[in-house]
Amino acid sequence: MVPKILIIEDDISFGEVLRRWAVKNGYEVFLTSTMKRAKEIIRKNNADMILTDLRLPDGDGIMFLTWLREIKKNTPVIVMTSYAEIQSAVSAIKLGASDYLEKPVNPDILKQKIEQALHQKIAAIPVVKSNTDLQKKIVYANSKQSREMYEEIEVIAPTRMSILIMGESGTGKEYAARMIHEKSKRKEAPFIAVDCGILSRELAPSELFGHVKGAFTSAIATKKGVFEQADGGTVFLDEIENLPYEVQVQLLRALQELTIRPVGEVDDIKVDVRIIVATNENLEKAISQGRFREDLYHRLNEFTIHIPPLRERKEDIPEYAKFFLKEANEELEKNITDISEEAMEMLMNYHWNGNLRELRNVIRRATLFAKNAEITPKVLPDFLCALKPETGIEVGEGDEKERIITVLRIVKGNKAAAARLLKMNRKTLYNKLHQYEIDI
């Protein structure tokens, strides 16, 4: 069966180039330049994948993804963007986009990303997880730090206390929240995870508390919010520091009075939910800067769990790597049975700045490209192959331009790896490459 791709691109000539390329590569193509027309195509046709520009004449990729979620369409989406809009692309990923692609588009990378997207099953966010599904998503590691964390979870899980989970990005804060739910008296009820980083001031009240039909222009039907969907269960609010200040007031009221009021509704609705929140930021600093309410902080922080970074518990790496391998096999329909000793040694020696999320991405990529029954060094990313323990790279010293050039050479031009070593985000790295006129 020929895969169907919807291309949304307002640059008519570039859109036509993409269309011809897709047809040449065996895809059936729908091409449009507006979000309005794209919606009409989606309602009438079953596209297998969507390739969309981030900026459109009548909206943007973020609005489009939000609409897809509202109509419960799980079609994989790849957004195209310039390097200056990487942060918006990251927001699109959080909203459920499969991937993003920087312009100018490299045909080989485009082909690879499309094939990956066509094999993915994208779930709407937030997702109500079944009890069985939650158990599949939990892995228990064996380091001293992890065992201490599990002991804390065993004690706190059966209570009604609100919990603040702290840790670097990618350390597994949602894993910990799932464990708490599984060991609580609410385990048979819904667990709903929400990324507050994608909730705008306008979207957040409806997403969390729901709305009635006609409450605002796009409210074409009454919608239950996260709190009402999770009644009797657990709501996990990740990146709580990003919750708009105005919505923090509504959240505090919901926690104190155990009631919510959907947008456009005149009566309150009683709800019974347990709140678990997570952050990688110092909330006390956010309070001092006026970005986070102190009364809400104390209401949420009845108990704190700290998750250490992966580099401080490296003995956990083999367990997580095998777990992620099993996940990748199921997702990519592969049958890779093991990770070679040499490959595992490289995983153990790497300084995982992206923590479990970075490890999962590496294993997923390696599984995709593995040709035999095991993952070997050949299918691991170049930055893992290049960075041996004995290299002793000091990326924090010396002239900045020279450091950037040195690191880029070591990782063979892999900018994502270079950004991690240099401890900066990719947008900052791209800006510095432009500033110093570096072309590697």
Image (cartoon, helix red, strand yellow):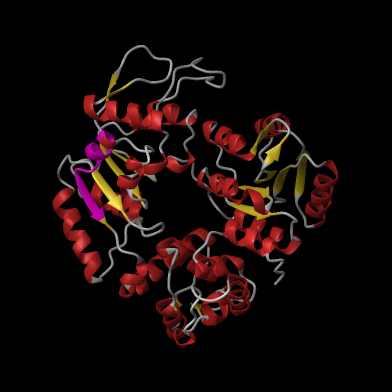
Magenta span of residues: 295-305
* Nearer to the camera, 71 or 426: 426
Left or right of residue 280, residue 155 in this image: left
Quarter-wise, where is residue 401 in the image?
A: bottom right
* Nearer to the camera, 317 or 200: 200
Left or right of residue 37, residue 322 in this image: left
Placement of 170 over or under 81, stated as above or below: below
Q: Is residue 306 among the parts visible in the rendering?
A: yes
Percent position (x, y) of residue 138? 32, 57
* Residue 304: in magenta span: yes
Percent position (x, y) of residue 381? 56, 74
Write the residue at 75% across / 51% down.
27
* Nearer to the camera, 233 or 423: 423
Write the residue at 42% across / 80% down.
349
Quarter-wise, where is residue 411 in the image?
A: bottom right
Q: Is residue 128 among the parts visible in the rendering?
A: no
User: Looking at the image, which residue sits at the far front?
Assistant: 399
- Count all numbered tags in the image, as a single digit: 0
Query: From the image, which quarter does the C terminus lie in?
Result: bottom right
Left or right of residue 86, residue 188 in this image: left
Percent position (x, y) of residue 172? 35, 57
* Residue 2: in magenta span: no
User: Looking at the image, which residue sits at the far top?
Assistant: 266
* Nearer to the camera, 163 or 422: 422
